[in-house]
Amino acid sequence: MDNRPRPVNNLIFSGILVLLVLFPLLNCSTVSNNDKNSTFGIVIHGGGGVRDRIEFEKNPELERAYRDKIEEALSDGYNILLKGGGSIDAVEAAIRVFEDSPLFNAGKGASFTSAGTNEMDASIMNGKTLRAGAVGAVKFVKNPISLAKLVMQKTPHVLLVGEGALAYAREQGVEIASAEYFYTERQWESLQRRLKEDVPYGGELKEKREGADSSEKIKENNEDKFGTVGAVALDKDGNLAAGTSTGGRVKKRPGRVGDSPIIGASTYANNQTCAVSTTGLGEYHLVLLTSKEISALMAYKGMALKEAVDYVIMKELVEIGGSGGAIAIDKNGNVAMSFTGEGMYRGFVLDDGKAVVKIYKE
């Protein structure tokens, strides 16, 4: 046996080999949540386009109002999970907070179509059973997410739209509101600006321009700064759920349905991988099937949650001219939140009970 000291050069070479092996692991994008799995938790978003920092600096009470609603939504969902409730109920509760607030483009704060009406979309999915429910282009329903949940639980269907969805809401005793309830000055003024500026109907899928700068496309698509809301959750039984709700694009054509009620586009949950909710210009999420794409990369490519979310949002979505963001939680309680713009109203609470609320990029 050779007990002679190993040459220094060999030691250096061995050290380099070790670093080359460990480097990918040290830089992988897995979210560790303080190096431990979380047994339950909830993640929420209030849209991928946020108000300008200057606006909040001039009006700190407005920023506080947004943060308070995010915290309220987190609290309502988290308390259900803490008491052993299901992820579906937690997702519904969190989204209802957003739908009841005029600050977000969902429910009461829904945008206006070109005809001056409010048409809303929502969906919800159970990661354990892969059952889902959704409503599209529905009017007067105070909480579309709750109607989507009823479609999932009480019908053999996945998606009801328009007058049929409204009729089912009335049949089930879902709370109906007047047109006046959905009127907000902010959204009405946004529609008037769009009409005067002759901005095209929100939601067209533009062909990718050869040689076009992706940042230009992102700026174009973020003109409407108030977006979709959503939530994803993992309960103590290990079940995942996802939900999304929106008022759609300002000045959209009546009858336009975006990605929010389409399972696999904006909303997807599967106990084997993750739960996802997205925000952004829906036409791009529709063709990319963003939420299902994230799950598929985890299932078939072995990607970690954050790696998959970042790849789809920051690469695939941008490459086709889209913009927006996504929130996700996986079966181990890891969290990911990714977006292309300057910010996204977002937050999460895991089993440690510590709420994290963010608006802008770090």
Image (tube, rainbow, N blue to C red):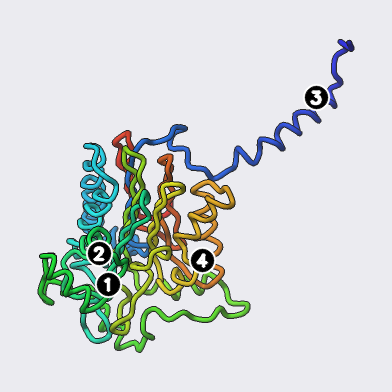
Residue 338, quarter of picture: bottom left
Q: Which comes sooner in the sequence, label 1 or label 2? A: 2
Of tags 2 and 4, which is closer to the observer?
2
- Which residue in the structure is indicated by mark 1? 160
User: Residue 322, how many percent across, how many down?
Assistant: 48, 70
Q: Check if mark 3's residue and mark 2's residue have beta carbons within 8 Å.
A: no
Q: CA distance from mark 4 to mark 3?
A: 45 Å
Q: CA distance from mark 3 to mark 2?
A: 67 Å
- Using a 10 Å C-alpha cutoff, classify the residue at mark 1 as few (fewer than 14 neighbours), some (14 to 19) or many (20 or more): many
Label 1 amino acid?
Leu
User: Residue 44, how many percent across, how many down?
Assistant: 32, 52
- Which residue in the structure is indicated by mark 3? 11
Circle 3 SS class: helix
Label 2 amino acid?
Thr
Above or below: residue 165 compared with residue 44? below
Of tags 1 and 2, which is closer to the observer?
2
Q: CA distance from mark 2 to mark 4?
A: 33 Å
Q: Check if mark 1's residue and mark 2's residue have beta carbons within 8 Å.
A: yes
Q: Check if mark 1's residue and mark 4's residue have beta carbons within 8 Å.
A: no
The residue at the point 36 percent across, 65 percent down is 49
- Which residue in the structure is indicated by mark 2? 155
Circle 1 SS class: strand
Label 3 amino acid?
Leu
Q: CA distance from mark 1 to mark 4?
A: 27 Å
Name the quarter where the N terminus is drawn.
Answer: top right
The residue at the point 58 percent across, 80 percent down is 209
Q: Which comes sooner in the sequence, label 1 or label 4? A: 1
Circle 2 SS class: loop
